[in-house]
Amino acid sequence: MALFQNISIDQLLSSWAANAGPTEDEKIAYANAVSEILDDSEMVKKFIENVNQVGVWANEIDDAFDKVTRVFADMVSKYGGSLPEIKNFNNEWIGYKERWVSHLLLSRDVASEHSAILKRFDKVYLDMVESIQTVQDVKDVVLELQVFIDEDHDRSQEMSAGFLSLKRDIQYFVPRLDEWIETTGQELAEDAKRLQREIESLNSQIQVMDSKIEEATTALIACGACLCVRMVPMRMTGSLTHFQILGIIVAGSVLAAYQAEKDDLLEQLSGKERELAIVNQTQKDLANLQTEFDGVKPDIDLICQRLVLFAEIWSSVRSQAVQIQEALKGATSAPTDMGFKSSVKLARAMCSPLEAGLEKYATTLENRQKEKEGKN
């Protein structure tokens, strides 16, 4: 233990990396030190609880996924009409949740598999290694070990990659949704400005048309007055002049044309005002959507943090299994070497608590799944 007092494991590993790895004495001392720790019943209990902690993480991730899923469903209900693109983001999130459930179930199966694998390591193969007495024993054990080493135990790597891939996709999902909100907000602001300009232009055109209508009305009234004044002479002469008749027709036609044009402008104005009202409401919806999305970002961050932990623990399990395999391979060259014996001692010390932790985790998830199915 003296070799590793007052120095962290990270410092130790950094030192080994800088010096092309540990010395043989350091390897032996490290293996013995860890073995002693794992011989401590309280430390073993804590180790098992640390492995089982992923069951707590699973609950946290589930709760976070449920909360975010409810918020997205609510946003689709409230804003899906004015902002239909949010439906695509909602469907994407549902896909992430389904992937999480799939990976979690796979982790349960992998935990059970690794628990059984570690039990075989400990009770069969490591027991065989520690029972070696002759050179022939070594040869026999090596043959047995090779069969075991050649078995496919890589589902933990597949699952670890699955958790990391899901974490990356969710991390990318957040800025994409933020970018869509920002871009949509900019487009709506431009639409609002354009519509406001068009409304102002239409109002100006309507004012001009009101002036023209007023002028045409005045002209038509004037023609009517002339008609009244000429009624007596007309009776005497028998008819209006062609110029008088033409003046009345032109004044009436111009007034009708102006009125029709104004009606068209009013219809356009009404349409633009409706468009602007929709844009203004959509801007409010987008602002509310942004606020609600910001509210679940901490939950999404929690999901990403916990997914990394899931990936790391399973990567660690696989790495430890590989280390055990490598230690066993050493039996061919130095079955009585102190370094090898220390490695085997460490392997056996690691197997039991790790096996128990994985078994507890698998059982926790199994019971949790049954409980969820019972609620549904």
Image (cartoon, rainbow, N blue to C red):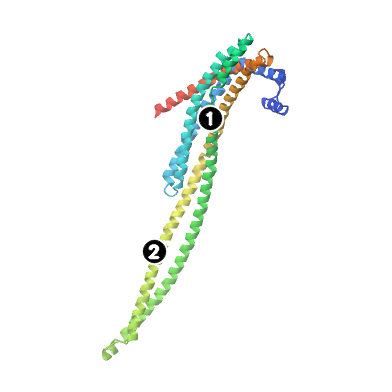
Compared across the picture, whether 321 is left or right of 199 comes to right
**Disc 1, SS:** helix
Q: Is residue 219 above or below residue 48?
A: below
Camera-nearest residue between 224 and 310? 310
Q: Which residue is mark 1?
A: 158
Q: Is residue 365 above or below residue 204?
A: above
Residue at 46% x, 45% y: name it.
86
Disc 1 versus disc 2: nearer the observer? 1
Looking at marks 1 and 2 on the same chain, the residue that comes earlier in the sequence is marked by 1
Residue type (three-letter) at the residue carrying disc 2: Glu
Residue type (three-letter) at the residue carrying disc 1: Glu
Q: Which residue is mark 2?
A: 267
Camera-nearest residue between 121 and 77? 121
Q: Is residue 272 above or below residue 121?
A: below
**Quadrant into which the C terminus falls:** top left
Camera-nearest residue between 327 and 195? 327
Residue at 58% x, 22% y: name it.
321
Quarter-of-image position of residue 277: bottom left
- Total labels drawn: 2
Callout 2 crowding tier (Cα within 10 Å): few <14, some 14–19, many ≥20: few
Quarter-of-image position of residue 124: top right
Residue 35 visible: no
Q: Position of residue 127 (x, y in %)?
A: 58, 12
Camera-nearest residue between 187 and 325? 325
Residue 91 visible: yes
